[in-house]
């Protein structure tokens, strides 16, 4: 999963479908979600998986209204199409992606 920052964020979400995990290194649920995202990344086609540390990219987090973490946001061509706050299990995450990718 590519690490995003202030410099590369806008360019990174311009692709067809991009999922961004807004997280923090100190966040327990974020640590639980990370291996789930890595598994799903291997199974789900045509979605780019990225992550943004909200402590390092706080301006981007503010711009997108991220108030709680983990927050995952699905972008299509740079526009937010779906958002989920909190932990999702593997099957829930796959279903969420598939539902919002249509």
Image (cartoon, rainbow, N blue to C red):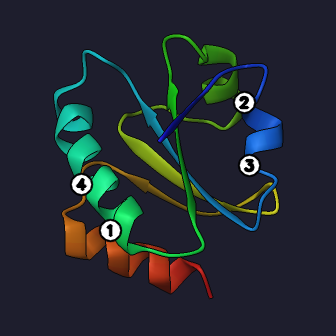
Query: Which callout, 3 or 4, points at the residue further toward the start of the chain?
Result: 3
- In the rendered view, tell whether residue 67 sits above or below residue 39: above
Q: Is residue 10 left or right of residue 88?
A: right
Dot label at residue 63 = 2
Residue corresponding to mark 3: 13
Q: Residue at x 76, y 28 (%)?
A: 8
**Residue contact between numbered discs 3 and 1, judged by CB atoms under 8 Å:** no
Report which quarter residue 78 is drawn in. Answer: bottom right
Q: Is residue 98 left or right of residue 60?
A: left
Query: Which callout, 4 or 1, points at the residue further toward the start of the chain?
Result: 4
Few, some or many residues within 10 Å of mark 3 (<14, 14–19, 20+): many
Query: Which callout, 1 or 2, points at the residue further toward the start of the chain?
Result: 2
Q: CA distance from mark 4 to mark 2?
A: 26 Å
Q: Indicate the secondary structure of the residue bearing disc 1.
A: helix
Query: Which callout, 4 or 2, points at the residue further toward the start of the chain?
Result: 4
Say which quadrant the C terminus sits in.
bottom right
Q: Relative to the observer, which residue lies in front, 15 or 24?
A: 15
Q: Residue at x 68, y 26 (%)?
A: 60
Q: CA distance from mark 1 to mark 2?
A: 24 Å
Query: Which callout, 3 or 1, points at the residue further toward the start of the chain?
Result: 3
Few, some or many residues within 10 Å of mark 4 (<14, 14–19, 20+): some
């Amino acid at each position: 999963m590519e690490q995003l920052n202030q410099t590369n964020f806008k360019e990174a979400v311009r692709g067809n479908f991009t999922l961004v995990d807004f997280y923090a290194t100190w966040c327990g649920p974020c640590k639980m979600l990370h291996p789930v995202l890595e598994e799903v990344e291997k199974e789900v086609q045509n979605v780019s998986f990225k992550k943004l540390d909200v402590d390092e990219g706080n301006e981007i987090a503010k711009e997108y209204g991220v108030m709680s973490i983990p927050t995952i946001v699905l972008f299509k061509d740079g526009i937010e199409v779906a958002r989920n706050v909190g932990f999702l299990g593997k099957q829930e995450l796959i279903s969420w992606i598939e539902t919002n990718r249509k």
